[in-house]
Amino acid sequence: MNKTLQKQKLLQIGRFSFGMGDRFAHQAKAQLQACILAAKQGVEIVPVWNKSNREHTIIGSEPPSVRAAAARAVKELGWKKTWHIDADHIRLETVDRFLDSSDFFTIDVADSIGKPAPAADIRAFVKRHPELVGDLEIPGIGRPIKTTRADVERVAAKYLFAVQDAGKIYRHIAKAKGAGNFITEVSMDETDSPQTPPELLIILAAMADEKIPLQTIAPKFTGRFNKGVDYVGDVAQFEREFNEDLAVIAHAGLRYGLPDNLKLSIHSGSDKFSIYPAIRAAVKKFNAGLHIKAAGTNWLEELIGLAEAGGDALALAKEIYCDALDHCAELCAPYATVIDIDPKKLPSKEAVAKWTSAQYCAALRHDPECKDYNQHFRQLLHVGFKIAAKKGDRYLKMLEANEAIVGRNVTMNLYERHLKPLVV
Ligand SMILES: [Zn+2]
């Protein structure tokens, strides 16, 4: 047992939390409204506003702006429950400008996966953890998980360096903010191969050795989690592994003394409608917590609201699409692993120019039942937020002029399509 981790007094995150991206810092109120709707149904959702270093760089914003926008919304709507600001996907090189304004840190060690830890460290890890070798009985998993010493060595060789890296970044943050004053997430999602449930167990043992008071962990799950569109993959396999992951988390929390609210974080978790029933059932079965990090699709609701408003607002929404089409390759490059766009299925500029409000909204809104929904159009616009950022004040003023209609789309998307099927 890891007594140090257990005794530490921690700022703890609640059972259900939702990571909301708000690229242009104009929708915090509309997002918080969705949590208020859930609270009215008796379900507490902790709002966590997140913005990654990559997004700040593309938009040209600074981390304190995220806290300022959230604080304003919290005050205006009289939200008395907890809320947090997540420094999303930070690393040692990028964390410093987030230190003051964040109380949740997503330590991204994906790039360190596969780099070798010192051989002596790997040997020591395997020696320290004889319990990881053999037929492992984990409550909630019907059959024992079989592992050999060689398996543990192989997993340690792949992940131990990344866990040590997470420890370094964690201690850097703790030195600045004081241990216990922030929530720690470690993410491993932006990598090539998914982590299996037995690998997750070994990783968690290593996290505890490294004394990281981990409250949420974002593994890479099986299947594709493309930005802003539905899950692509084997739903039955996802369901099986997700259930096993929850069993592993409950077991590892007790066995290694990790914080008792440790939970899974699902990145690019918005819009994965086909796996929401499986997630909902598993969370209920294990009485588990859940953190969903939306793929920044909030900004698509802004576009839908503008299109719905018609007139100049619709014209700007069309202009953004046309510019995005002109810069398709450049916009898609940084997101190559998390989008799948078939250029042949993108509507032409000429066609879009003739669209009505209803046509634009139907193509963009994620309603799988709607025959005019176009996931290629949606994904291109999703990565196209740089185009809107370039419009500067013109875009922001348009959002302000159409605040009500945009806000209604933001709130309803979050509440009806996400919170309701997942936990409410
Ligand atoms: Zn992520």
Image (tube, rainbow, N blue to C red):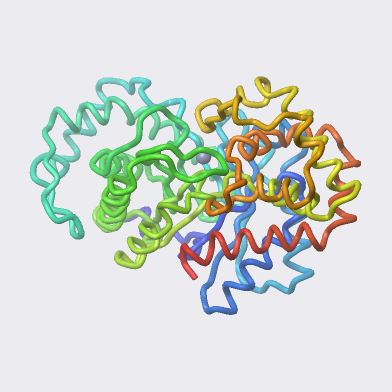
Q: Is residue 254 above or below residue 221?
A: below
Residue visible at 69% across and 46% down in the picture: 300
Q: Position of residue 177 (x, y in %)?
A: 60, 48
Image mark count: 0
| Rendered view: 216 above or below 412 | above
Q: Quadrant of residue 324?
A: top right
Can residue 1 be seen here? no
At x 63% / y 47%, what residue is drawn?
A: 297
x and y percent of residue 380 in the render?
65, 33
20 relative position to 318: left or right = left
Residue situated in front as seen by the camera: 305 or 267: 305
Q: Would you say 211 lies left or right of 106 here? A: left
Which residue sits furthest left?
135
Quarter occupied by residue 412: bottom right
Quadrant of the image occupied by residue 53: top right
Residue at the (32%, 44%) spot, across then down: 204
Assign the N terminus to one quadrant of the image: bottom left
Q: Residue at x 57, y 50 (%)?
A: 104
**Where does residue 340 sit, x and y in percent of width and height?**
52, 30
- Asked whether, in this view, residue 401 is left or right of residue 115, the answer is right
Let me know if residue 387 appears in the view. Answer: yes
| Front position in the image: 68 or 226 | 226
Q: Residue 5: x and y, percent?
A: 37, 54
Given residues 68 and 340, the one toward you in this image is: 340
